[in-house]
Image (cartoon, helix red, strand yellow):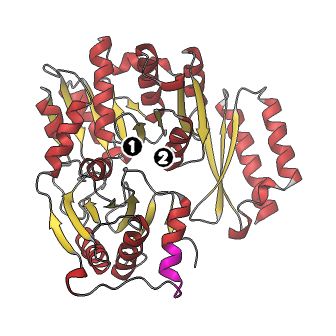
Amino acid sequence: MSRIFGTDGVRGIANSDLDSMLAYNLGRAGAYVLTEEAHHKPKIALGKDTRVSCDMLEAALIAGICSMGGEAVVLGVQTTPAVAYLTRHYNFDAGIMISASHNSYEYNGIKFFDSKGYKLSDELEDRIQKIIEESEYRLPNPTGIGIGKKTEINNATLAYINFLKSTVNIDLTGMKIAIDCANGSSYIAAPLVLSDLGAEVIVINNEPDGININKNCGSTHPEILQKIVIESGADVGFAFDGDADRLIAIDNNGALINGDYIIAICAKHMKRSGTLKKNTVVSTIMSNMGLEIALKEEKCSICRTKVGDRYVLEEMVKNGYNFGGEQSGHIIFLDHNTTGDGILTALKLLSVMKETGLQLSELKSIIKELPQVLINAKIKNGNKNRYLDDVEIKNAIDDILKSMENKGRVVIRPSGTEPLVRVMLEGENETLIRSYAESLASLIEKKLL
């Protein structure tokens, strides 16, 4: 079998790619791997977003955990960062989030957290998969009093809300804030946090029905929120995705503020307040070169990783950094939480606005984005990484970089799910880099299809 774990857990069409049996087996194998060293009946937290298939997968995971003698602690509808925090807060042995993040309702996913709230390494995920697939592993099947049970925590959301409020020291009285909850798991916590801090909150897409999660709303479709910010005269808008681990902001003029802008704004503030460890930000290869230039002007460094907030986090932990994120809006404030947290990021942006007295439209001037062009090159599935060894392709890339005089980038990234590689060029002249990108993509298809 191919690897069932992607960049963010196991994901697929619910009841097809990701069915109850797979969820049950993930519950069993995950409970075994993550609680091997627990010398007590392990407790594993379970959170979920609002999509219709969550109840089915939750039941299967509970059965798997209980069949291993574990206690499945049901948290109800929670954001992904809430599960990461609550796993630490309640000293659980592990945590599981049921969500397909920004995907539409027919998809779902299962992602694991260890006892410290960190997503699992590739090695641990591979071990879980190996246990599921190989018959040589004989997992225990306790009977009698050895069988686990399900319990529930009814005030978990309140604990998370109190945590969020503790991360900032601001009074939002007099501010008007519009938010789009994507009909996802932020629909309870996000409005309450902001109103508790004094803001006037305009909320849209906070009536989940199981199938409307992310449907023409949230961080992947912020157009309606942009209009509402302008029409209502709001100071700022915040769009979350289905599990609220990412944030896209809208400034007071209705302009979209992506993760690169958010990173630059917060990094500058942290640097000047002395809270940015090693004056370094971690981001991915997809972040705009404009971010790199802006950070350099603030005498900050950038460390790039491959795409995926888990890889950003791994680099942060490995080298002692405390701030990083992705252009897509996954922003990690490691001093507070162990994963991207959309609501926390909104609060941190609001803190910068309050402390500087500047609107987001003014703060965003820190970055001048360079044009980016992204083209997909269709190739044979087995050839995804062969561009690295092809002399003609390597020479073409070198020629492009020389012609841009090191004022641009070429990034080639194999797709994790499709038979193609993504060719991204970045530079000062959009017409020129588009021509380069089309030429390079055509060459890759010619050589590797």
Element under disc 2: helix
Residue positioned 31% across, 46% down in the render: 218
Screen quadrant of the C terminus: bottom right
The image position of residue 364, as x and y in percent, is 43, 21
Which residue type carries mark 2? Asp
Residue depicted at 24% across the width and 23% down the height:
235
> At 36% across and 55% down in the image, what residue appears?
115
Is residue 292 shown in magenta? no
* Residue 224 x/y as whole percent: 28, 41
Q: Secondary structure at mark 1?
A: loop
Amino acid type at circle 1 is Gly
The mark that comes first in sequence, 1 or 2, is 2
Comparing 92 with 1, the one in front is: 92
**Residue at the far top in the pictured view:** 357
Q: What residue lies at 31% left-to-right and 17% top-to-bottom?
A: 359
Dominant secondary-structure state across the stretch colored magenta: helix
Is residue 371 visible in the rendered image? The answer is no
Q: Is residue 136 left or right of residue 71?
A: right
Q: Is residue 131 magenta?
A: yes
Q: What is the spatial separation of the Cα atoms under label 1 and label 2, in whole angstroms?
A: 7 Å
Q: Position of residue 225 (x, y in %)?
A: 27, 38
Q: Are marks 1 and 2 in contact (CB under 8 Å)?
A: yes
Res 388 visible: yes
- Crowding around mark 2 (Cα neighbors within 10 Å: few <14, some 14 to 19, many 20+) is many
Q: Which residue is mark 1?
A: 340
Which labelled disc corresponds to residue 194?
A: none
Q: Quadrant of residue 1?
A: bottom right
328 versus 68 height, above or below: above
Would you name the residue on which mark 2 appears?
309
Q: Give the side of residue 319 with respect to residue 263, left or right.
A: right
Q: Which residues are magenta?
A: 129-136
